[in-house]
């Protein structure tokens, strides 16, 4: 539902109990002798997870203290708290949070901040202003559908003319697709492959705090299924854009942590953007079936052998430009004439599988309508 958020706290909403843990030391932001601006308009001091935290899987937010010159004189001090909500709860963002998790998130965030020598009340966190929020959904496939093939289909549609986005960017050899604007971005990426990428090329931050590959390995080991995960994220980094989007969706909400941490908003934001592209992507996938797409469909047949899958693929691909009679005559000259008929019968029995990748996009729509959280337990089926 929600992944990354950036909260903003005003000067008197938080208390730092150890200034030395920030780099540089930010005591001079608050007390004399004050840190000079030296011609700058603002000063920054940060605190991130250290080496020990990363090695011991102790997830922590990114903290930034900012001191600015006021427009009408004086100074403004604020703290930004950036973190991934599911990583805070689960150590990964494959498992998705629910609206009912909000109070648990507040308590755990408060405890993490205390570890970082920052005191904030639960109420201040609850009503903190949102500077950035990422709404997201994982779509899992275990029928040999690949996330990269879905991304390829989506990329063929000119979405910039349909959405209020103006820049497109491919990353990681087609494993990630970005649509940008200054205030927001829409992202699709292959979740499993993204974990393999170096951190600088990854679609997400804090990769060292993402212990997910063991989840996918465990799913494959227990269920013997090639799980693929397509991730969709709507990243909003401008409060004016958030206000405009809520107005368009006819949803009234405060731009606070509590106000935006709702199933209704997350679902409506993602569903609205998907509906704008759904039918066009669906038809594009149907009309542009490349050989690799066809072979992917063949592999969806349960318990099919490699030899039979290759035979079926060859027949289907040759059928695009040759008649059945011509293929039958070529095969009958060298092999049993009934071989081709058996293959044709098998094709007719599995016709829906061969020609239904476009319906995968209907499945994505259905999952957004249902909007049930992805949970590793659903795939692992671990004993209670």
Image (spheres, rainbow, N blue to C red):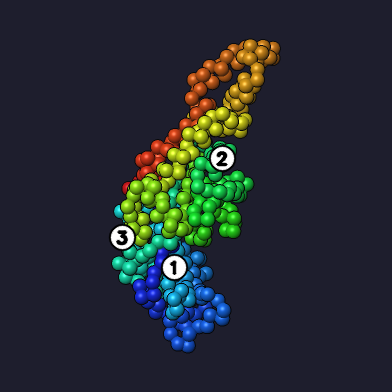
Residue 58, percent from left and from top: 44, 65
Q: Secondary structure at mark 1?
A: strand
Q: Secondary structure at mark 3?
A: helix
Residue, disc 1: 80
Residue, disc 3: 103
- Across the whole image, how many numbered discs are drawn on residues? 3
Name the image quarter holding residue 331. Answer: top right
Q: CA distance from mark 3 to mark 2?
A: 41 Å
The residue closer to the viewer here, 87 or 220, is: 87
Name the image quarter holding residue 155. Answer: top right
Name the image quarter holding residue 340. Answer: top right
Name the residue located 35 percent from the left edge and 68 percent from the top edge: 110
Residue 35, percent from left and from top: 50, 83
Instruction: Give neighbour class at mark 2: few <14, some 14-19, many 20+ (Cα, 10 Å).
Output: few
Q: Nearer the viewer, mark 3 or mark 2?
A: 2
Residue, disc 2: 158
Disc 1 or 3, which lies upstream in sequence?
A: 1
Question: Can the viewer see residue 85?
Answer: yes
Disc 3 or 2, which lies upstream in sequence?
A: 3
Residue 279, percent from left and from top: 48, 34
Answer yes or no: do the residues labelled 1 and 2 have beta carbons within 8 Å? no
Residue 178 relative to residue 74: left or right: right
The residue closer to the viewer here, 356 or 73, is: 73
Q: CA distance from mark 1 to mark 3?
A: 20 Å
In this rendering, the answer to whether 376 lies above or below 53 is above
In this rendering, the answer to whether 235 lies above or below 305 is below
Disc 1 or 2, which lies upstream in sequence?
A: 1
Name the residue located 68 percent from the left edge and 14 percent from the top edge: 330
Q: Secondary structure at mark 2?
A: loop
């Amino acid at each position: 539902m929600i992944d990354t958020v950036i909260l903003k706290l005003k000067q008197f909403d938080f208390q730092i109990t150890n200034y030395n843990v920030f780099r540089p030391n930010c005591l001079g932001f608050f007390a004399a002798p004050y840190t000079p601006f030296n011609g700058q308009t603002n000063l920054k001091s940060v605190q991130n997870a250290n080496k020990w935290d990363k090695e011991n899987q102790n997830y922590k937010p990114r903290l930034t203290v900012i001191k600015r010159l006021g427009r009408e004189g004086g100074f403004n001090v604020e703290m930004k708290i950036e973190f991934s909500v599911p990583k805070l709860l689960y150590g990964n963002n494959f498992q998705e949070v629910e609206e009912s998790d909000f109070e648990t998130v507040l308590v755990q965030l408060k405890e993490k901040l205390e570890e970082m020598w920052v005191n904030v009340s639960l109420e201040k966190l609850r009503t903190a202003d949102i500077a950035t929020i990422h709404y997201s959904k994982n779509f899992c496939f275990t029928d040999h559908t690949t996330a990269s093939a879905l991304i390829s289909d989506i990329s063929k549609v000119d979405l910039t003319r349909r959405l209020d986005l103006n820049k497109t960017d491919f990353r990681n050899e087609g494993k990630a697709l970005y649509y940008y604007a200054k205030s927001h971005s829409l992202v699709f990426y292959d979740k499993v492959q993204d974990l393999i990428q170096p951190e600088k090329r990854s679609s997400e931050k804090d990769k060292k705090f993402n212990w997910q590959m063991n989840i996918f390995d465990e799913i494959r080991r227990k269920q013997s299924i090639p799980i693929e995960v397509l991730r969709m994220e709507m990243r909003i980094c401008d409060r004016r854009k958030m206000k405009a989007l809520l107005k368009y969706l006819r949803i009234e909400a405060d731009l606070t942590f509590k106000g935006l941490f709702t199933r209704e908003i997350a679902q409506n934001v993602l569903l609205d953007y998907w509906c704008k592209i759904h039918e066009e992507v669906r038809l594009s996938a149907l009309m542009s079936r490349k050989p690799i797409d066809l072979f992917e469909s063949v592999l969806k047949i349960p318990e099919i052998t490699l030899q039979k899958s290759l035979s079926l693929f060859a027949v289907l691909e040759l059928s695009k430009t040759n008649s059945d009679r011509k293929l039958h005559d070529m095969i009958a000259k060298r092999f049993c004439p009934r071989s081709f008929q058996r293959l044709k019968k098998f094709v007719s029995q599995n016709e829906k599988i061969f020609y239904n990748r476009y319906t995968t996009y209907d499945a994505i729509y259905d999952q957004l309508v249902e909007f049930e959280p992805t949970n590793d337990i659903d795939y692992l089926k671990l004993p209670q």
